[in-house]
Amino acid sequence: MAVVDRRKLVIEAAEKSFALFGYKATTMDQVARIANVAKGTIYTFFTNKEELFDEILRSIIADMKRISEQEVHEDKPFFENLYQSMDALLVYRREQELLIKLFQEVRDFGTPQAREGLEKVENAILDYLERQISRAVERGEIRSFDPKVISFILMKLYVALTSDWNKLHEPLNEAQIKEFVKMFLTGGLSPE
C-alpha cells in the first residue's frame, strides 16, 4: 500500500481552492475538504493560510524559473533566449489558474495578500530578467543600460501585451506578442 503524502495533498488542495475561489474566499475548511484530510492535519504542516499560500507561491516561482532556465542556452543570442523564455512563460501563464485568479482578485478586490503574492512573483521575474540582461550587456549583445530599468520595462511590456491589452481588445496571439516585443526592443537595445 502506498504511503500518502498528506503535505502534498494539502498543498494541491490549497492550490485548487485558491485558483477557484481566490485568496480571500479560501478557508482552511475548504482546503481540508478538497484534500480529504482533517483540518488539524493542515496545521501540522502550516501555521496559517498565509504560510500555505507562500508555499504555493514559492513553488510557482520555482516552476517559472525552471521553465525559463530550460529555454535559455549560453550559446544562443540574448533575443533568441528571451523569445524562447517568453513562449514558455506564455504557455505556463495560460495554464496556471492560480495566477489568473490572483490577477482577477487584485483587480476586483485589491486583496492585500493576493497583491503581495503577485509582487513576489513579479520580483522573482525581475531578478531573473536583470541577470539575463546583465549577461547580454557583458557579452556585447545589447547596449549598456540600467538592467533594473530594462527588466522593469520588459516585464511591463509583457504584462501589457498579454493581459492589459485583452481588457479592451481582442487578445493577441503568441506570434503577435513576440513581434511587438521584438519591434519595441531590437531597435532600442541592439548594439549600434
Image (cartoon, helix red, strand yellow):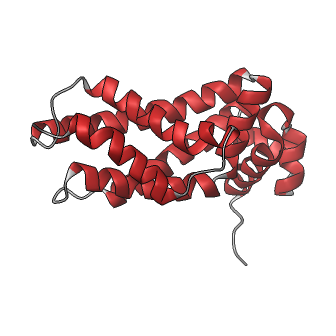
Q: Is residue 42 left or right of residue 174?
A: right
Q: Quadrant of the N terminus?
A: bottom right
The picture places residue 176, in percent across and down from the top left corner, at: 48, 54
Q: Quadrant of the C terminus?
A: top left
The picture places residue 125, in percent across and down from the top left corner, at: 43, 37
Query: Quick check: can you spot residue 88?
Result: no
Towards the viewer: 68 or 46: 68
18 relative to 63, above or below? above
26 relative to 83, above or below? above
**Across the whole image, how many numbered discs are drawn on residues?**
0
Q: Is residue 121 left or right of residue 49?
A: left
Using the rendered view, name the quadrant where residue 70 is placed.
Answer: bottom left
Towards the viewer: 49 or 169: 169
The picture places residue 108, in percent across and down from the top left corner, at: 79, 28
Using the rendered view, name the quadrant where residue 5 is placed.
Answer: bottom right
Q: Residue at x 84, y 39 (%)?
A: 28
Q: Residue at x 81, y 30 (%)?
A: 24
Q: Is residue 39 left or right of residue 123?
A: right
Towards the viewer: 142 or 22: 142
Using the rendered view, name the quadrant where residue 149 is placed.
Answer: top left
Q: Residue at x 66, y 49 (%)?
A: 170
The picture places residue 12, in percent across and down from the top left corner, at: 71, 54
Query: Quick check: can you spot residue 130?
Result: yes
